[in-house]
Image: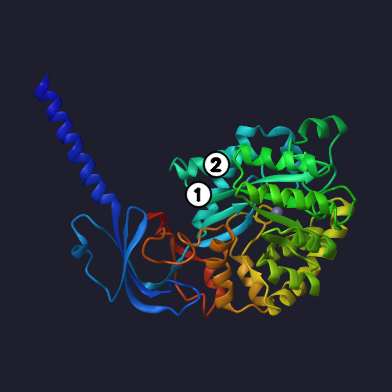
Amino acid sequence: MKNNNKWLLTSLMTALVSQGALANVSVIHAGTLLANPAGEPLKAQTLVIEDGKISQIRSGFIAAESFGDNVVYIDLKNRFVMPGLMDMHVHLQGEIGPKNDSEKLRMSDADVAMQSAYFAKKTLLAGFTTVRDLGAKPEQIYALRDGINKGWIDGPRIIASGGVSVTGGHGDVDGMSPDLLDKLTTKTICDGPYDCRRATRRAIKFGADVIKITSTGGVLSDTNTGTGQQMADDEIKEIVDTAHALGRRVASHAHATEGINAALRAGVDSIEHGSYADKESIKLFKKNNAFLVPTLLAGDTVVNMANNADFMSEAIKAKAKRVGGDMMDNFARAYKAGVKIAYGTDSGVSAHGINAREAVLMHQAGMSNKDILISATINGAELIDMSDSLGSLEVGKYADIIATDISPLEDISALLDVGFVMKNGQVYKQ
Ligand SMILES: [Zn+2]
């Protein structure tokens, strides 16, 4: 019996060691490597990945065998290699479409969770290795985030928000019978500063990585209340102070000028959409070191839907055409004025997996390809306070790596066709 146990232990250890050696070291030969999108690409580089992190970057193609037996060799000699893309504004729990109303009634929470796992995988395979989810049923998005982190499900690294909104504002439930509205109103809907302090603490208690607020109305809420400021100054200030005190950042959805400026004055870390930023907003962005997350793809999508589909109410259609149509010019002004931009699509308004179309729209609005890549890597990492582990390929950082056939510095639409995806050193697409 004793001997049997000893044999079992020895063979178990052998199995663990050989599996570990197999899985833990990968060597990539990169034809062109843009390790840091703020710098210049280099030809013929070797990347060594151990335990999910980058352990070496060396010039030339160094033979994989020289890094040990059982290393996994990945040949990207004819590819353009760069850090995984980061989308700072997605909604993994759904996609806007004509069936949304019936789905709300028919789909169980478990159904929604399964669907969001499917959308998460699509997003990862499109080359987006990190996303910030800014609006979802909280318990489900936290479970998805945690399940992905544990390796149960394939998906991007998720920074998950808890939403705090005011009664009747964008972010509250709308467009249903009164008893359903009552039933579905979340516990983080608040009114007045003290109540909003409670709601913020509650969101963090239940697992929010970041707090999402809605300082103005939104295009897709069916309430006929416009896109002006909806949260009072004292409510926004209280939420921001409470979140910051508990180590969480705050993202504010905002369209109208006064709502953008109120949120920036209160100290939010990013403005989502920022459709009508004015000169004062631009000053405040710079003063606070805050990011604009433009979501041009959402604007483009809702204008198309308003013009070509018939499932939106008249109130939504009118907002979509006006705000969606103005987003490109407003973004171009903010970019030219030097506002820091973090890449974000609002996917879920658009379909999941086409997140790279945002890059094409940013390019059309006049942003340089290099700045677009920076917005989708380095700036995203800074916005979520993970610059020490994400955003560029450096020794010690996570091996979140993608590759394209042609250089996105030359043609930004190369991002629409990402052929290789690695996250945490694990290959998901090759
Ligand atoms: Zn959104």
Q: Residue 160: horizontal and vertical position, in percent?
A: 60, 47
Q: Residue 114: horizontal and vertical position, in percent?
A: 57, 38
Q: Residue at x 39, y 79 (%)?
A: 42
Choose top left, top right, bottom left or bottom right for residue 82.
Answer: bottom left
* Label 1 or label 2, whichever comes before in sequence order: 2
In the depicted view, which residue is nearer to us: 326 or 317? Answer: 326
Choose top left, top right, bottom left or bottom right for residue 81.
Answer: bottom left
Q: Residue at x 72, y 74 (%)?
A: 334
Choose top left, top right, bottom left or bottom right for residue 167.
Answer: top right
Q: Residue 38: horizontal and vertical position, in percent?
A: 50, 76
Mark number displayed over residue 311: none
Q: Tell me which amino acid carries mark 2.
A: Leu
* Label 1 secondary element: loop
Q: Quadrant of the C terminus?
A: bottom left
Q: Residue 47: horizontal and vertical position, in percent?
A: 33, 67
Q: Tell me which amino acid carries mark 1.
A: Gly
Q: Is mark 1 within 8 Å of ligand 1?
A: no
* Residue designated by label 1: 155
Task: Give the left or right position of residue 254, taking residue 209 as reference.
Answer: right
| Dots 1, 2 in contact, CB < 8 A | yes
Task: Give the left or right position of residue 301, taking residue 147 as reference.
Answer: right
How packed mark 2 is, by other alpha carbons closer than 10 Å (few <14, some 14-19, many 20 or more), is: many
Q: Residue at x 61, y 58 (%)?
A: 88
Q: Quadrant of the N terminus?
A: top left
Task: Give the left or right position of residue 324, taking residue 11 as reference.
Answer: right
* Label 2 secondary element: helix
In the depicted view, which residue is nearer to us: 125 or 164? Answer: 164
Q: Is residue 305 above or below residue 164?
A: below
Q: Residue at x 77, y 52 (%)?
A: 236
* Residue designated by label 2: 144
Q: Quadrant of ligand 1?
A: bottom right
